[in-house]
Structures are given as structure tokens and as C-alpha cells.
Image (cartoon, rainbow, N blue to C red):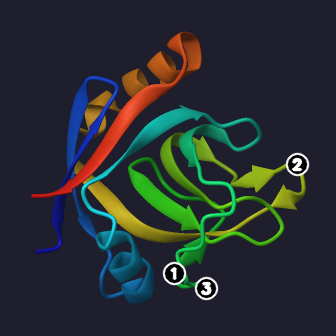
């Protein structure tokens, strides 16, 4: 039940929810599955792509939060001093916004397809926004 599939920019990744460490974030996100949007390249954070969510409120606070997600980690920033967002790290990330450093809830870890993360990141960087879909496996 914690397994999921992520389709992004023509690539398929498999992973799992971090249910033990981020139970509220996982529960809030599951309510939206399957979740579809677009990813764009980050502006300040380094090697990552993100889903800008504006004022969307998932109703969660901080849990299992980090400013330095590893490649394949997906975090949810619940909003506050910057807009709500989902970020997928494909390389080195220092999670930030124009307001400064942020921390987001690490709630998904990609376990399969990691070899395609950099290609996805480069595709988004050079070709622009790409579709992303999260679904239960």
C-alpha cells in the first residue's frame, strides 16, 4: 500500500511513501491520488524540479522536514513564507526560495528508475514544463 508509480517527462519511476516518518503528509497527499500536474525546473534550489501549488493547503505542518533532499527524494513544502510546492531532487539541492532557505517534508522516496533522474532534470531544464503523474502501485 505504500508503493507508488510516478510518470514524469516520459520516464517512469517507482517508489514508496515515507509513512512512518511523515504520516500526516502521506495521508494528505493520498487523498489526491492519482495526482497530475506539471513540473518546472527550480529557480534557486539547485538540481530539482517542482510543482508550484500557490496557496494550496494540504493541512499539514512540518514533519520529517529537510532543506537538503537527496536525489530521488520528494518533499512537500506546506507553505508559509513561500508558496506551497512539491519538489523532486535529481541532484544536489539546497531547498530555497527568493525568501531564503526553506524546509520541506520528505514524504516519498524513489527506489527504481534513479538512473533517469538526471535525464529528467535536464529535459525539464532545456525543454520546459513536463507532465507528472503520481499513482498508487
Q: Which residue is mark 3?
A: 61
Discs 1/2, front = 2
As rendered, which of 118 and 59 lies closer to the eye?
59
Residue at the extreme right: 99
Q: Which mark is residue 64?
A: 1
Instruction: Residue 87: give x, y in percent of width and height.
Output: 54, 51
Q: Which mark is residue 125?
A: none
In the figure, residue 118 lies in which quadrant?
top left
Measured Cα–Cα span from mark 3 to mark 2 = 21 Å
Q: Which residue is mark 2?
A: 98
Which residue is rendered at x = 42% and y = 83% of the image?
Answer: 22
Q: Secondary structure at mark 1?
A: loop
Left or right of residue 2, residue 69 in this image: right
Which residue is rendered at x = 44% and y = 79% of the image?
Answer: 25
Compared with residue 73, is residue 17 higher up or lower down, i.e. above or below?
below
Instruction: Residue 7: give x, y in percent of width and height.
Output: 25, 38
Q: Secondary structure at mark 3?
A: loop
**Quarter in which the C terminus is drawn:** bottom left
Instruction: Residue 95: give x, y in percent of width and height.
Output: 69, 54
Amino acid at each position: 500500500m505504500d508503493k507508488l508509480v510516478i510518470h514524469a517527462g516520459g520516464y517512469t519511476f517507482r517508489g514508496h511513501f515515507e509513512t512512518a516518518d511523515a504520516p500526516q503528509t502521506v495521508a494528505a497527499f493520498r487523498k489526491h491520488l492519482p495526482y497530475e500536474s506539471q513540473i518546472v525546473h527550480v529557480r534557486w534550489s539547485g538540481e530539482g524540479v517542482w510543482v508550484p501549488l500557490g496557496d494550496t493547503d494540504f493541512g499539514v505542518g512540518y514533519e520529517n522536514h529537510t532543506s537538503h533532499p537527496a536525489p530521488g527524494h520528494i518533499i512537500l513544502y506546506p507553505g508559509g513564507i513561500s508558496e506551497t510546492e512539491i519538489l523532486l531532487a535529481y541532484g544536489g539541492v539546497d531547498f530555497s526560495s527568493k525568501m531564503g532557505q526553506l524546509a520541506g517534508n520528505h514524504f516519498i522516496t524513489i527506489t527504481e528508475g534513479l538512473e533517469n533522474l538526471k535525464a529528467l532534470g535536464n529535459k525539464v531544464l532545456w525543454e520546459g514544463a513536463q507532465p507528472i503523474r503520481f499513482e498508487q502501485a
